[in-house]
Image: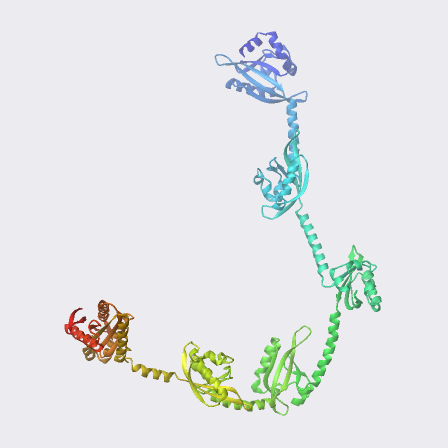
Amino acid sequence: MKQVLSKIINGDLAFTTMFDFVKDLVFLMEVRGSSYHYIYVNQSAFKVLKSDDSIYGRKLEDVLSLEQYMVLAPKYDQVQSTLKSVEFIEESSVSDKVTFGETSLNPIVTEEGDCRYILAIVRDVTEIKQEEQKTRAKEKRLDSLVKYNREAVFEFNLDGRFVSVNDRAMEISGYEYDEFIGQSFKPIVVKKYLADAVKLFEKALSGTSAEYEIAIHHKKGHQVYLLINKIPIIVDDMLVGIYGIAKDITKQKKLEYLLQESEQRYKSLFENHPDAIFTYDTKGHFISGNAEVENLSGYTRAELLGKSIESLIEPVDVDRALNYFKKAVTGKKSQRYETSGRNKNGSRLDLSVTKIPIVVNNDVVGIYGVTKDITSEKRLQKELIEKTEELEAFWNNSVDPIFLANNNLDIVQCNPAFERLFNYKIEELPGLKNERIPFELGEEIEEIITECIGNGKNILLKETKRRTKNGDLLDILASYTPALDKDEKVTGVYGFYKNVTHLKTIERELKKTQEKFQLITENAFDVITLTDFSGLITYVSPSNEMILGYKYEDYINYSYRNFIHPDDQETFGKRLEAMKIEDHLSTVEIRMRHKKGHYIWMDISTSTILEDGQTKKAVMIARDATERKDLQNQLENAAYYDYLSGLPNRRVFDDKLNQAIIQANRLNKKVAILMLDGQGFKQINDTYGHDAGDAVIKEMARRLESSVEKNATVTRRGGDEMAVIISDIEFLKEAEDTAKCIIQALNEPFYFNGINIQIGAGIGISLYPDDTDDKKRLVTYADRALYQAKEAGGSRYRLYQNNSVERGRD
């Protein structure tokens, strides 16, 4: 740079000529204090400044305008102070022509570090700046077009991500600008339309515009329908993005849906209407119809096409039908009438027809013929007339009274039979309500009002009484049914009476006889049962429930055998068979099942009933034999068991000992006898009384039974003396272990009326056959051992051995 500077300063012609051919403006400025002087200017710069060599040495402010100087001077100052280059673009106006220069100010620094010179190079960038301004203007116009477009505009990059959106796009989607930018379009597209949206986006990437409909998810959740035009963005022949211009067609889609729904509803109403709908042109020719047209006429719609209206009408009704058709066309009003016609099979039809004009733009373009088959209704009307005549005949000729009353139960109409029975004429009936219904039956009025008139229910075969005009009281079987008007509203009640006075008199006589029989059976303590000879029960007296727990309905139509103990079935069966042959009173003892499951002994006396001279039924008179059987069992029990303790007595002891010895001989086992006597029993009786003594005996018996195994039998021999037989043992130790358990159990405290009574006991043990094989001696040896135990005092046991008593244990 210094050499360049030296050559310029020294006026090197070759070097300066080189700069003269440079289009850029070149200035070399010398720094003199705070001012800047021109020392070199190339030819391009001379032309722009319109100057010559006279410019050399002049100051910057002397050459430039004040405005230009005020812009450039600070730049030069900055270069001098920072010793760094400064670049900037300067706008200037020469001869009303605006130019732009890209200026570069470069400091030339000496070895001492001072900035002595500044080299200024100015390049003309006017064309570049003008192109930039044009581009920016285009961008602004495009931005304005996008921003203020009435349609939504989306800009995508090549990956399908949003680059920008306009306000309308945000408005119709509900999303903010930042929620779009950088996101893929796929998540907001409704799944149903996603595949097509991707396919058409790819088509736009190929450089082809595409228009299609999709639906997107609004931020609030509902769907928005859009008509989108995808436009490729091409810059310098390169695809850089995609514009999507979207029109909100949601309202249009809703209107299309409503129109479609309306059409479907009309079509559904038309096709599914229960009546036949014929569509005619204004000349009366068939052009279309619903499915019911085919059902009614028997013709297919293709067969009916073009047929005239009169072809389906009976000849006698054609003129009238055409007249109504003409009125509908000319008057633009519906016409309704009844006529008759025939279907394809020739069957005559009664028809109700409504002719409805089809009006479009105030012109009648056709006629709907809504046709209903009323053949059944007409037939029913005819049948109703016939039935009415029949009912009138029934009303007038019935032998039973019939009447019609209003909701106040005032009779407004009655048949001749009613007048004959009660001796009233129809004109006499109003106001005689209390005469007809005895005072004591007045609640019947309330029932009729509530059930029949209020709830619309029938009251059937109600036994009641009515009074005639002469005051005679009649037995009446009455039925009531609501009287309904055409709207099925209750307007009164029909009453049907049957005079059963004679029958009721016979019934009362029979009832008296039955009551006498019932009085006997229902108050008998014994159970009286009637059966046939298969055992099927036809009657059982109430006492059965008291004795066996079964109600009347539990027995009726069931076999008597179902309630007999299985072991007594044979006995009962034989008795039943014997009754068929001979009729005499006999008694059998069997067990009958109680409802709770247990069995009760019954004494049953059996006999037969004759009907028309033949034996048809059997009578069972059963008496509860429980008390007798219990007494019998008690007597048997008293012979073998102690009444106080419930333990077996001496008699059982002897039997059990015999059985134990026989079994021991057979099995080569041993038998032990434990003789036991309580301590101080007499003192307990004397001190606390016999109740205490009895309680001690019972407690001893309980503790003894709980202390022995299943192979032991506990018996009471008298007083507080008890004995235990232990059978099927192999070793003496088993008897000793039992004795120990007994002593331990008896030593436990026993409280009677709050008093602690010490029981305790002594025990003597003998062993068969070790001590003896004689039963009586075995008992005697046990008694001896007991004696020794009592002599030793306290609760303890002793063993008998070799005619002496072995030492026992406490």
Q: Quadrant of the N terminus?
A: top right
Q: Percent position (x, y) of residue 386? A: 74, 78
Q: Quadrant of residue 763?
A: bottom left
Q: Is residue 99 visible?
A: no
Please say if 692 is above or below 469: above
Number of disc labels? 0
Q: Percent position (x, y) of residue 665? A: 26, 72
Q: Is residue 510 left or right of residue 407?
A: left
Q: Percent position (x, y) of residue 566? A: 43, 78
Q: Nearer the viewer, residue 89 or 430?
A: 430
Q: Quadrant of residue 459?
A: bottom right
Q: Quadrant of the C terminus?
A: bottom left
Q: Nearer the viewer, residue 148 or 480?
A: 480
Please say if 570 is above or below 582: above
Q: Quadrant of residue 507?
A: bottom right
Q: Percent position (x, y) of residue 577? A: 48, 85
Query: Tell me, what colour scheme is on the image?
Result: rainbow
Q: Residue at x 62, y 16 (%)?
A: 25
Q: Is residue 338 left or right of residue 225?
A: right
Q: Is residue 777 visible?
A: yes
Q: Is residue 179 left or right of residue 544?
A: right
Q: Nearer the viewer, residue 435 or 75?
A: 435
Q: Is residue 440 left or right of residue 624?
A: right
